[in-house]
Image: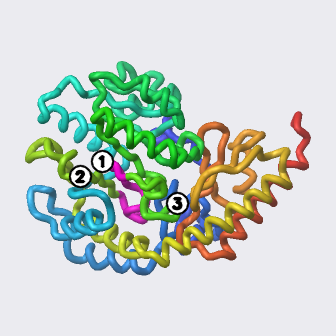
Amino acid sequence: MVSPVMPTYARAPISFVRGEGSWLEDEKGRRYLDAGSGIAVSILGHAHPKLVAALTEQAASLWHTSNLYQIPQQEQLAEMLVEATFADTVVFSNSGAEACEAAVKIARRYWHVSGDSQKNEILTFNSSFHGRTLSMISAAGNSKYTDGFGPLTPGFTQVVPNNIDALEREVNERTAAVMVEPVIGEGGIIPLSDRFLKEVRQLCDDCHLLLIIDEVQCGVGRTGKLFAHEWAGIKPDVMAIAKGIGGGFPIGACLATEEAAKGMTAGTHGSTYGGNPLACRVAIEVLRIVNDADFLSDVRRKAGRMRQRMESVVATHQQVFAGVRGTGLMLGLVCKVPNTDVISAAYEKQLLLVPAAENTVRILPPLNIDENELDEICDRISAAADEMSKVPAHA
């Protein structure tokens, strides 16, 4: 008999009842160190007092009105995002997939109002992930997500990442935009080089294409800058964000320049819930905390420490791990054994990790994690690998 909750996830047999900081507690009172942050969402940990206060205060006054009316909290958050980024304007959603959908709509609409409606194809990259809607699984083109869901949405072509020649070969008269994750997350924590991102920006300029950056997972301080593309010194035309911006409350956003968004007039896009007072009030508090020079400097310092510790763990457990990659507090352990086995072994050490493609385990701790907890993550991964190393390879 099917479960009342549709079985679309292979869920771990763990249920959490409360959280505080970098820790989650299950129904039996066991405390787990959370190195996954709900897949890069709870960037300030659990039950952060400022987020709790913001949520409680807003919940006591007004939750939702719809976008039929002006929403002061939405306007404030949009102004903060515009001030902090390349963007001139923002449209809000409930998730990363919706933010990416909005980005594609903005790009296609741009060329439509520019008098060139045949320019409607988007170039994306192998191993990318932009969400689970039909259009976004079509954008990624990964058979893991597309099998059985055809016909797929046309207008997307995938290219090898970190190869500007391969990208340039796919540009034609129908190409509207390039869509790229600066750090490919779901696909295995694969950072794209600064040089490549600069080349993509230049190619878009030379060929009159829009550049869409997907920072749903790698944005909002995760790499030690507010947004990951800043490391390459480039500016996109459109950017999708979500996950961390809500600190655990569902909200997404698509940011754009005035030029890129020139086709987005009344009636061209909408969302009943997107950018409601409750979501925006929490996101305002998240942005106030994260978009601070000292906070981001601290993320970079902790990221350097964690990378050094994880390199040591890999070096001393070569039976289990092949390497570590990533940037900031967004690391991937490439495994020689099934990554699911590593995650299961970590559960035994009351540590939460996240799987990714290419047999990788993601480490995505809260950005405000303290150094002792950071060291504890590394110690628990090492202890789990010790246990795995004792098991015969044929077992």
Give the residue displayed 40% in from the left and 47% down from the top: 214
Q: Please say whether residue 133 is visible from this viewpoint.
A: no
**What's drawn in magenta, residue-wise?**
235-250
- The mark total stands at 3
Residue 251 in view, yes or no: yes
Q: Residue at x 53, y 61 (%)?
A: 37
Dot placed on the residue nearer the N-terminal end, 1 or 2: 1
Q: Secondary structure at mark 1?
A: strand
User: Could you tell me which residue is drawn at 48 percent across and 70 percent down?
Assistant: 44
Pick whichever, 64 or 257, lies toward us: 257
Decide: is 3 above or below 365: above
Corner quadrant of residue 381: bottom right
Dot label at residue 238: 1
- In whole angstroms, how far apart are the C-alphas of marks 1 and 3? 19 Å
Q: Residue at x 68, y 68 (%)?
A: 305
* Mark 1 or mark 3: whose residue is earlier in sequence: 3
* Of labels 3 and 2, the one closer to you: 2
State the residue position of label 2.
257
Where is residue 346, by image quadrant? Answer: bottom right
Identify the mark at residue 223; answer none if there is no mark: 3
Whole-percent x, y for residue 100 in the image: 33, 43
